[in-house]
Image: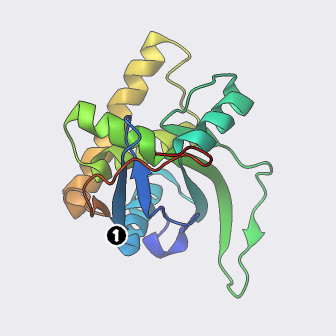
Amino acid sequence: MGTESSHKVTFSKLPARFSDASDVSFGLLWERKELVQRLKFLLQLLCEEPTHLHVEFLDSVNMGALNWQFRGKGTPTDVLSFPPHRLQSHMEKGSESRTLPLGELAVCVDVCAVQAKRHRCSLAEEIERMLVHGVVHLKGLDHERSEAAHRVMTSFEKVLRQSVVGSFGEPKFCSVTSGASAHRPRRGVRR
């Protein structure tokens, strides 16, 4: 199995805010180092070769558009997985290590916040649950194939999450920093 340092994790800009189901906005603080450490550990559990994973964090509008474009569903979803276009390895700039692109994940923080409330867990726990789910999809499992596939994937994800939590404790890589702010007025609407 590859060492933790052989895997590469990149992100889009980590969002500073998210909106809940009632369109109330909250601030976020991220611990990037913890998030990377946890994801590299997950990759170490699943990938024998040095692997590169990219994660995009989206709001509900952009996730809804992506879900429509790729799945024909007009509502935002929690996570989408995109396998790499080519499975050939590539050289990282300035490094002699070779990484295989595992793919990209799109994670909707807004949807994760709603689900965290429903599941009575922290936002970091829900985001980590979605990251594990997305990576398992990138490794080839698909819960939509059959009820048996759903049971296998759900059990596998639970074991992976327990391994990460067992090694690092409960996730704390993101936290809500501010209470609800006033609804933001829409452009062109007077309040």
Residue 177 falls in image quadrant: bottom left
The answer to which image quadrant residue 10 occupies is bottom right
**Residue shown at 66% from the left, 43% from the top:** 82
Residue 2 showing in the rendered view: yes
Is residue 45 visible to the viewer in this orientation of the structure? no
Please, what secondary structure does the residue beneath circle 1 have? helix
Q: Residue at (19%, 59%) from the top-left corner? A: 169
Is 120 left, or right, of 22 in this rendering?
left
Please, is residue 28 above or below residue 152 in the view? below
The furthest residue to the top: 147
Q: Depth check: give the residue in front, 37 or 105.
A: 105
Location of residue 162 in the rendering, given as x and y in whole percent from the top left corner: 24, 46
Compared with residue 49, is residue 87 higher up or lower down, i.e. above or below?
A: above
Residue at 53% across / 47% down in the picture?
59
Figure check: 58 above or below 44: above
Q: Residue at x 25, y 62 (%)?
A: 172
* Circle 1 residue: 34
Number of marks drawn: 1
* Residue 185, position as x, y percentages in the image: 49, 48
Furthest residue to the front?
190
